[in-house]
Each structure stands twice: as structure tokens, then as C-alpha cells.
Image (cartoon, rainbow, N blue to C red):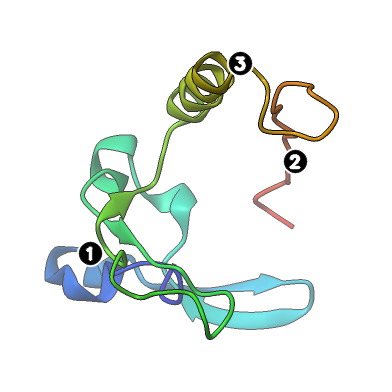
Amino acid sequence: MSTVSNIKSFPEFSSRKRKRTINGLVRDDWWLIDFSVEELKRVGINQIRGATRPKMFDGLFTYPTLWEVLTQVKNFNNRTENQRNPNKKPVGILLEIKDYEV
């Protein structure tokens, strides 16, 4: 979470930082699995991909719930009448579920 959020600015969460081995690499970081939805809603997320992405939105948005993402996609499709895509099909969601113990 340290590279994609402002978690470092929450002293009350400092004790949650811990080491985990992911794909053979040990990382000392904060992990989503250790937080409640209510806590994650207090943490702002950052854009990290690409040097050209504006940083002005960093920290303004929080981790969305699946319901919030589904609602946003549904509203987008209704608002644009599915005309946003060249093939005129609605935007969809592809979920990738991972084992958090890996």
C-alpha cells in the first residue's frame, strides 16, 4: 500500500506495517487484508503508473468497494448509452481473484 496510497500519513496505522513473502520476495509494507473497509475509506489512493499522469488527484479518492465499482460502470453505460466503445458494447468488469496467502 505504501506506493499506491497515503498510508504513511496515518500514524495510527504504523503498527500494521509487516513483512510478507510474495512470489519469493520479502516486502515490508501495509497490506489491504489487514484493514477494515471503514479504515480503507480513510486512506487516499495515488496514481503510480506513468510519469505523465497528473499527481493533482493523489489522495483525493479512496479504495472503492466492488459495489461502488459495479455501480459506477452501470451508471457510465447508462449515461453514454454504450456509445463509448467502437463496437458499441457496454463497458464490463473482469475480476481477478488472488489468494492473499500466496
Residue at the spot x=49%, y=81% of the render?
28
Closer to the chain start, of discs 3 and 2, is 3
Which quadrant is the C terminus positioned in? bottom right
- Per the image, the residue denoted by label 3 is 81
- Per the image, the residue denoted by label 1 is 13
Using the image as rendered, state which of residue 17 and residue 80 is in the foreground.
80
Within-10-Å neighbours for mark 3: few <14, some 14–19, many 20+ = few
- Per the image, the residue denoted by label 2 is 96
Which quadrant is the N terminus positioned in? bottom left
Q: Does residue 35 lie above or below 1 as drawn?
A: above
Distance of label 3 from label 1 (alpha carbons) = 43 Å
Tell me, for residue 53, which label it has, or none.
none
Using the image as rendered, state which of residue 18 and residue 94 is in the foreground.
94
Horizontal placement of 20 versus 62: left or right? right
**Amino acid type of the residue tagged 2 in the rendering:** Glu
**Amino acid type of the residue tagged 1 in the rendering:** Phe
